[in-house]
Image (cartoon, rainbow, N blue to C red):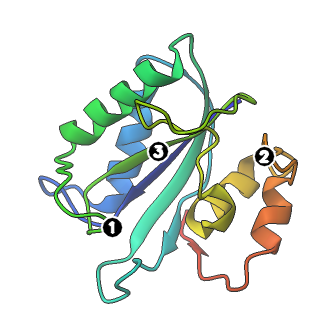
Amino acid sequence: MILIAAGSSLPFCGVDSQQIVLRAFSALGRFTTLKEISALYETPAWPDASDPPFVNGVAAIETALPPEALLQALHAIEAGFGRRRRQKNAPRSLDLDLIAYHQERREAGTGGLQLPHPRLAAREFVLAPLAGIAPDWRHPVTGATAQAMLDALPTRQARRIS
C-alpha cells in the first residue's frame, strides 16, 4: 500500500481547504490508481495554533512510479494549488506527503526521501484519517498498526468533518 497524506489551511483562487484536499486527490487519480480516500479531519495548526486550522486526509494508492518520481508529481500538484515553500510549518494551500511506499524502508539520503515518513507515528493529522481507512496497516519499521499509533498519542484534537 502506498499512502499519501494531504493537508490544507489556506484557500486558493476562491477554493476552500476541504475542496483543495479533495481536488488534490482527484489530481492524484489522474496518474495513479486511487484505492481509498479517508474522511477529512480538521486539526489545529502547529506550531502556531493561532494560524488557520488544517483540513487533512489520506489516500491509499497504487502506481508504477518509483518513490522519487511520485514525490516529484506530488510537488507538482502542490505547485498547481499555489504552494510556495517559503517558511517551514507556515500555513499553506496544499501539502502532500509520501507517508509510505509499500513496506519500503529508506533513510534520508541525497534526495532527502525517507520512508516511511519519519514523523508518521507522532502526527494525529495523518493517523486519524489513516486509521479510518486502514486501521490494521503496519508501520514498516516498528510493526505498530495505524490504530495503535493513534491510540498511543497523548492528546487527540482531530475532528472528523466529512
Q: Quick one: SS at disc 2? A: loop
The percent coordinates of residue 135 (x first, y second) are 82, 52
For disc 1, the marked residue is: 89
Residue shown at the point (57%, 48%) measured from the top left: 58
Between marks 2 and 3, how big is the CA–CA gap? 16 Å
Quarter of the image where one finds residue 8: bottom left
Amino acid identity at mark 2: His
State the residue in front, 4 or 100. 100
Left of 106 or right of it: where is 50?
Answer: left
Disc on the earlier residue, 2 or 1: 1
The percent coordinates of residue 41 (x first, y second) are 54, 66
Work out which residue is located at the far front of the displayed protein and give it: 110
For disc 3, the marked residue is: 97
- Disc sitting over residue 64 in the figure: none
Q: Quick one: SS at disc 1? A: loop
Between marks 3 and 1, how big is the CA–CA gap? 13 Å
Q: Is residue 133 above or below residue 106?
A: below
Disc on the earlier residue, 2 or 3: 3
The percent coordinates of residue 78 (x first, y second) are 28, 41
Q: Pick the quarter of the image with the C terminus.
A: bottom right
Left of 127 or right of it: where is 74?
Answer: left
- Disc sitting over residue 139 in the figure: 2
Quarter of the image where one finds residue 149: bottom right
Q: Pick the quarter of the image with the N terminus.
A: top right
Residue shown at the point (43%, 16%) measured from the top left: 31
Q: Are marks 2 and 3 in contact (CB under 8 Å)?
A: no
Residue shown at the point (78%, 55%) measured from the top left: 146
Between marks 2 and 1, how big is the CA–CA gap? 24 Å
